[in-house]
Amino acid sequence: MKIDISKLSKDNVIALSEKCAPQALDLEMPDVEFAGMLEVNLSAEKKNDTAIIKGELFLPLMVTCSRCLLEYPQDLRRKIAFDYTVGRNDTVIDLTEDLRSEIILTYSLNPLCKPDCKGLCQKCGEDLNKGRCDCNSKS
Ligand SMILES: [Zn+2]
Ligand SMILES: [Zn+2]
């Protein structure tokens, strides 16, 4: 994802709204499926030789609960703010790398379908959210 900064100036703030396929960012996230387009809403302005990019990214995901293995939708949302030093001849800023790291930072490594997910029984694999298994009563 790239921003054209050629029109940026001290008094010219550009608002930008873009969608792109998350695959384009070359994201590697285990146990995650992309459930839609990556949306980025930004404003860009330039002060002296610094381009200041602020905004928010949004990415709908299907993730797998780390305890009970249920797949559930989870929207990843993050406020972003980047500063780039730009030279006189720079006309384009490539945000791809920074967007990718923001998404990876935001993504939870141990997603839970709900905060008190009981997970699966380690002996029989029963989903303990749906009810108790017989393992404890027998032992
Ligand atoms: Zn769960
Ligand atoms: Zn059990």
Image (tube, grey):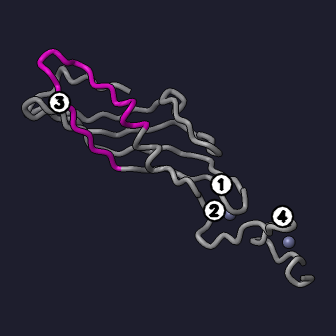
Disc nearer the start of the sequence (2/4): 2
**What SS does tag 1 mark?**
strand
Label for residue 113?
2
Q: Is mark 1 within 8 Å of ligand 1?
A: yes
The C terminus sits in image quarter = bottom right
Question: Residue at image x 43%, y 36%?
Answer: 100
Kindly indicate the quadrant of the structure image that contains residue 13.
top left
Q: CA distance from mark 2 to mark 4?
A: 17 Å
Q: Quadrant of ligand 2?
A: bottom right
Q: Amino acid at mark 3?
A: Thr
Residue carrying label 1: 72
Observer-side mark, 2 or 4, equals 4
Q: Is residue 31 left or right of residue 139?
A: left
Q: Residue at x 66, y 69 (%)?
A: 117
Mark on residue 106? none
Q: Amino acid at mark 2?
A: Cys
- Sequence-wise, the earlier of marks 2 and 3 is 3
- Which residues are drawn in magenta? 79-100
> Which one is in front in this view, the residue at disc 4 or the one at disc 1?
4
Which residue matches tag 3? Answer: 85
Q: Kindly identify which residue carries mark 4.
A: 125
Q: CA distance from mark 2 to mark 1?
A: 7 Å
Separation (CA) of disc 3 from disc 4: 54 Å
Q: Nearer the viewer, mark 2 or mark 3?
A: 3
Q: Quick check: is the Cβ at mark 4 less than 8 Å away from ligand 2?
A: yes
The quadrant the N terminus occupies is top left
Dot 2 alpha-carbon crowd within 10 angstroms: few under 14, some 14 to 19, many 20 or more: many
Question: Can you give x and y, in whole percent of width and height, for residue 34 in the image?
Answer: 59, 40
Relative height, residue 92 to residue 127 (above, below): above
